[in-house]
Structure formats: C-alpha cells, structure tokens
Amino acid sequence: MSMGGRLATVLGLFLVAVGLVVWGVATLLTPGVPGGVVNFTNTQAAGQPVNLTVQTVGAIGFGSHPTWVSYLVKDPRTGQWIHDTSWKLPANTVINMTVLQFDSGSPLRNQEWGQVQGTVNGAATLNGKSFSVYNSNTGNGVGHTFAIPQLNVSVPLVGVNSNANVCGAGPCQLSSPHNVETFSFKTPGPGTYNWQCFVPCALGYLFGNGGAMSTQNYMGGELEVVG
Amino acid sequence: MTWENSDTTDPHHLRRITVIWLVLSIVLDLLYWFLVGPHVPPGRMTSTAKADQFDFNVLFVIALPVLVGIWEYMAYSIFAWGSKRKGVPEPVGGPTAAGNKKTEVTWIVITSVVVLLLAAFGTFSVVTGHGSGGGEGPNPLWSPAGSVKAETAALAGTGSWAPNTGAVLPVQVIGQQWKWTYRYPTFGGFESSQLVVPNNTEIEFNVTSLDVIHSFWAYQLEVKADANPQQNNVAFTKTEQLGPFVVRCSELCGIWHGAMFNYGKVVSQSAFMTWANQTETANAANTSNLPPFAWTYVPDANGASGGYYPDGKLTPYSTVETYGSKQPGS
C-alpha cells in the first residue's frame, strides 16, 4: 500500500475511533427519556386556580418500559394523556389536582404516608368523600402517593380491587375500575420542586425500589414553578 | 540545615529564623483563635457542634506554626542562601550536604511531640464525647447519663419527657427514598415530617432506614449518622441555641438524593412541649395505624407491596440497661 493509502487508512480508523468515543459519551450523558415540560401557566386567568389531572397506571403499555408503573398527565390544551412528569406551574397559585387511580394497592411500607398532608384544608376527597387519614392495612390498600416533599404535600392514592378487571395498559379509560381523588395545594414562589410517589411500587425490583421509582418520567417528576 | 557553614558572615540564621517564627506563630494563632475560630463551621448550636469547632480550632492552632515554619524557612532560604548571593556554596554536594545531628534530633523531637500531642488530644476528645454526634452504632461508646433509661422506657412504651427535668429525649430518624421522617416515642410514638427538638436538652437520635443506605446529616447540630436498613445507629447531642437547622442526606441514595433535605428547628422547652402535644393529638388517627415503636423495621420483601413491621418484641436493650446485647433481631 502506498504511503498515501496508509495515511488515509490510519486517519480513517482514527476518525472512526473518535466518533465511537463521542457517541459513547453522548449516549451516557443524554437522559433516557426526553424531558418535555407540560405547561400549565396561562391556562387560567392570573391568580385563578389551575386544574391539573393525572392518572396512575399499573403498566404504561408503551415506550421503552411498557410494563412499568407510571403517572400520565392530561394536556391542559388538547386533553390528551401525556407521558411527562415535568410540569410548569404558576407561582403562588392554588392547584386543583384530580387523580384517576387505576392501580391496585397494598399496605404502606410507612403508614406515615397514609395521612393527607400539606393540602388546602388538610384533606382530600376519595370518590367524593372527604378524608384525611387512610388505613392502608384495610380495604384495597394504597397504590401510590402524590407527594411534594419540599412543600410537605403528601396524599395517599387508594388502590382499586386487584380482583376487578384492572386496566392493563395506559392510558386507561374511565370504563376501567378506578378511584377519583381530588385535593388542592398552593404553589410557593418560583423554583423547582420535585414530586414523587412514596410507595415502592416498582414491581420486580428489590423492595420495589429502582425501575420506575428511580427513573424520571415514571413515578416522580419536577414542578417548575414560575412567577 | 547548615546555617553555620553556609554564610560565614552571619552565624545567627537559626536565632533569626526562630524569633521570626515565634512572633509570627503567636500573632497568627491569636488572630485565628479570636477572630476566625468562633465563626468556624458548624457553629455552636449544640454541644457536639461546639466541641467539634473547638477541636478543629485546636488542631488549626497546632498546625499553623508548622505551616508558618515551613513557609518562613523556604522564604528565608531563598533570600539568605540564593545562588546569586556572594559566598553561598553550591546547593548540592559539598560540606553543606552533610548530616547535622543536632538538627536531626531537634526535628525528630519536635515532630514526635506534635504527633503525640495530637494523639493525646484526639483521645481526650473521644473520651469526653466530642464525637458522639457521629453515629456510634447500636452500642454507643459514649452516652450521656440517663440515656439508656430513656431508651429502655421508650421501647417499652413507658417513656416520658417534660421541660426542666433534664431528661434525655429519644428521637427516631427514619430514612426512606427520598425523605426523612421522625418518630417521638415519648409522645405516643407519633411520626412526623418535621424535626423539632427542645433547647438545653440531651437528644438521642436513633437513625435507621426503610430501604437503602442514607446518611442523616443535621449540619448545624453536628450530627451525622448513617441510616442503614435494619440497623439502629445512635448519635447524641445537647442543644444549646435556638434556631433553625438543615437536615440533608449525605449518602448518594438514588435519583432524588439531592432533594432529600428538610429543615428542623430548636425551640424552647415549653414551645417543644406544646408542639409535641399538639402533633400527638393531631396525628393520633394515623399513629394508631403505625407499627409499634421499634428501633428498626423490616420491609416486606415482596417488591411492590407490603408494609413495614417492627423487627422484634417490645424488649428493652437488656435487663441490665446496657446497650445492644438484646437488640431485637429481624
């Protein structure tokens, strides 16, 4: 091979190697799930409460982890269910949450999360009935919680009967067994606040942690509160 | 050091170096002790914070003359024995490179004394409980008077605490992904997301975890204890100042580790009593759903379900009130 050919080969292999390294690093640094933000600002007049509707599903049914448990949020403009747990909310505003809980439940690992905390009036409603404490050792137990630790907000999401025809894949339809829970909380000043489920609900992982519990966009997310 | 041979025109290098070092060391040590020392983290909010600040300042005051000596000698050497100065011998080889027994002995004696002083001071600190906020495991080496009695009563459900009694207050710290909660066994065992403690009180933190390893770090209290599942890690401190403090997890524990923090506060004993009684009443319905108070809890291993359970019977540490031998097994 001529000198030029050898140089071209070496240069080519070098570029391929560099390309592989760049690709590998970029892959490592890129989050696994694209992080869009669902915008709830400007959905109501300034100062008016914002309505936010989510559903919890035992298996999301699509994407890279179709069997994972997840939250879905209703797009405030299109009404479509979106797989995105990052939400932009207006500061110092009452958020009226409606949770459609389609998943079954169990006793809580820490019954502390059976108590409604940090909501307006310190209570929530379960299928129209107000409650402030739920004993997860009875009934269908608690499937998940919606909690914003920094705001001390925590609401148990009561499970549906696991023997019923539980929705197998999200987004779930209202015809499937579900509980409707409502509560309100007030956003603080601008900032970023994480929210999460406190029930270790990642089936198949040790003690239920890991998997959907430890991956953004499934059982936790961020509230981007803007002024 | 070869000051006698290096410059025959001035035989007083050692004396000069020593005087400069002594003056600089005393001045800098005094400036540090009185101007900087009182502001060194973590402050003076608790006995352990105060003790650790004192320990750090003592170590710094010991270290500062060493640092000054090295820097001064280096600067002096450059100035006095620089190769451009007349009469200075070659820096390598020759008579200046020969050993100097007096210097060697002096060096060994000084460094030995410093190291022995540090060892003695470290031992003093351990014996007097300066590190008691560091998490001593289930069998603390150091514990304040009355702590075993308080812990024994707490586990038996007979513990109590009241202002101005000098009683130790046991508080259980429970780590879970990703939040701290706190149980107060002397107030019916209620659990809360808030950490409130009374001033001028010996606090006994019993730190555990429901899942992975966390680390309870109450920075201003100078309490830092690992939270291990099915382990009770005991840490002590005595509160000495009112005010807020921050609690962080200092063990990388998962996706929301960075958000695993909250704020606690030290309040007056009467204010604490009011808060504790009110919270006990407000949480009574939920407290009845909690498992009986225990030092550790065993999570259900069924993955996505299951509650948590006490790891044993309501048994005090031991009948003779010593730590650990009867720590309930899981």
Image (tube, coloured by chain):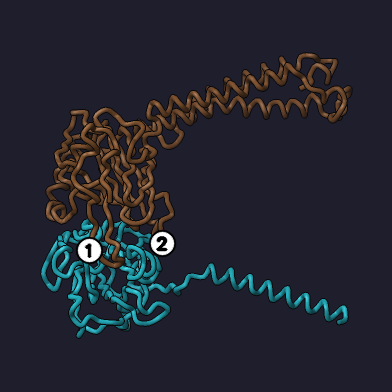
Q: Secondary structure at mark 2?
A: loop
Spot occupied by residue A194 in the image (x, y as percentages of width and height): 35, 62
Quadrant into which the N terminus of chain A falls: bottom right
Same chain for the residues at labels 1 and 2, yes or no? no
Q: Residue at x 37, y 38 (%)?
A: B136
Q: Residue at x 77, y 75 (%)?
A: A11
Q: Is residue A223 above or below residue B97?
A: below
Under mark 2, the amino acid is: Ile
Under mark 1, the amino acid is: Val
Towards the viewer: B304 or A50: B304
Label 1 crowding class (10 Å Cα cut-off): few <14, some 14-19, many 20+? many
Q: Residue at x 67, y 29 (%)?
A: B71
Q: Is residue A210 above or below residue A172?
A: above
Q: Chain of mark 1?
A: A
Spot occupied by residue B36 in the image (x, y as percentages of width and height): 49, 30
B249 sits left or right of B19 in the view: left
Q: Colour of chain A?
A: cyan
Q: Residue at x 43, y 32 (%)?
A: B52
Q: Which residue is mark 1?
A: A155
B27 sits left or right of B286 in the view: right
Q: Chain of mark 2?
A: B
Identify the image quadrant of residue A132.
bottom left
Towards the viewer: B26 or A66: A66
Q: Colour of chain B?
A: brown
Q: CA distance from mark 1 to mark 2?
A: 21 Å
Q: Is residue A183 visible?
A: yes
Spot occupied by residue B127 in the image (x, y as percentages of width and height): 40, 26
Q: Is residue B173 above or below residue B13?
A: below
Disc ID at residue B255? 2
